Amino acid sequence: MGWTLPRPGRGGATVPIVQEHRFSFDVEATPDEVWAVFHGPKPRVIEHGDVRIEILHPGADGGEGLVRHCHFRVPRYLLSGGQARSWEWLTELDPPRSWRYDAIGKPLWSQATGVTDLEDRGDGTTRVHFTETYHVFNPVMRFLLERRVHAFISRDNDQLMKAGVEAGLRALRKRR
């Protein structure tokens, strides 16, 4: 996934014009349970490690159209105090299988798209697949910083997301 452009003089090789990060992990839960962690009742503010998510609009039943404001770490050399912000909205929900978010972020004005797919493993476990693309609007900043900044942002995504899902599942099971 991701757009590519031909790189002149390299025998048809391509260079990505968006960054992409993919990962998957398994959890001991059904897709319905994992879906409930992400799309069930939740507080207006969620904090997990260095990430803070504020729900600005809950969206329709099931979460379609949910709008959130996220705060997360970025490299200090961006001169933003090491903090970034994004405004995200959920679209294309297919309960309990998949959903997509689109986002605009700063301090590097950027666009991101994330897709989460839940794969039922048939044995009471679910494989969570996550893909995110990241694209900086300014072509100079894209050339200089896009790859490094996205690598920084994505570095801990795998562990943070899995830990967040597992904590959410524990809380969900406690409420039952």
Image: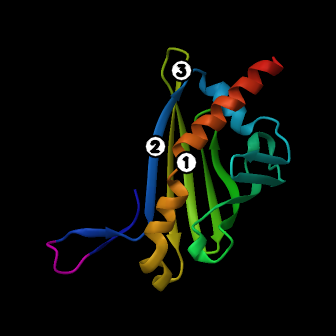
Of mark 1 and mark 2, the one earlier in the sequence is 2
Judged left or right of residue 6, residue 44 is right
- The reply to whether the magenta stretch includes residue 150 is no
C-alpha separation, residue under disc 1 versus residue under disc 2: 9 Å
Say whether marks 3 and 2 touch (CB < 8 Å): no
Q: Residue furthest left?
A: 11
Which colour assignment does the render follow?
rainbow
Q: Residue 26, relative to residue 17: is it above or below?
A: above
Q: Earlier in the sequence, mark 3 or mark 1?
A: 3
Q: Quadrant of the C terminus?
A: top right
Q: Label 3 neighbourhood size at 10 Å, few (<14), some (14-19), many (20+)?
A: some
Q: Is residue 8 in the magenta section? A: yes
The residue that label 1 is drawn on is: 157
Callout 3–callout 1 Cβ contact below 8 Å: no
Residue that appears at 60% across and 71% down: 76
User: 66 or 23, which is in the foreground?
Assistant: 23
Mark 1: give few (<14), some (14-19) or many (20+) Cα within 10 Å: some
What amino acid does circle 2 point to?
Phe
Instruction: Give the amino acid type for the residue marked by disc 1 in the picture.
Output: Asn
At which x and y percent is residue 134?
51, 64
Where residue 6 appears, as percent x and y from the top left, is: 26, 74
Q: Position of residue 19 (x, y in %)?
A: 44, 63
- Residue at point 76% right, 47% down? 47
Q: What distance separates the C-alpha of mark 3 from that of mark 2?
A: 17 Å
Instruction: Say if mark 1 contacts mark 2, CB within 8 Å.
Output: yes
Q: Label 3, on which residue?
A: 125
Estimate the x, y position of residue 156 in percent, counting from the top left: 54, 49
Mark 3, secondary structure of its residue: loop
Q: Write down the region rendered in magenta.
A: 7-11
Q: Which residue is mark 2?
A: 23
- What kind of residue is marked 3? Thr
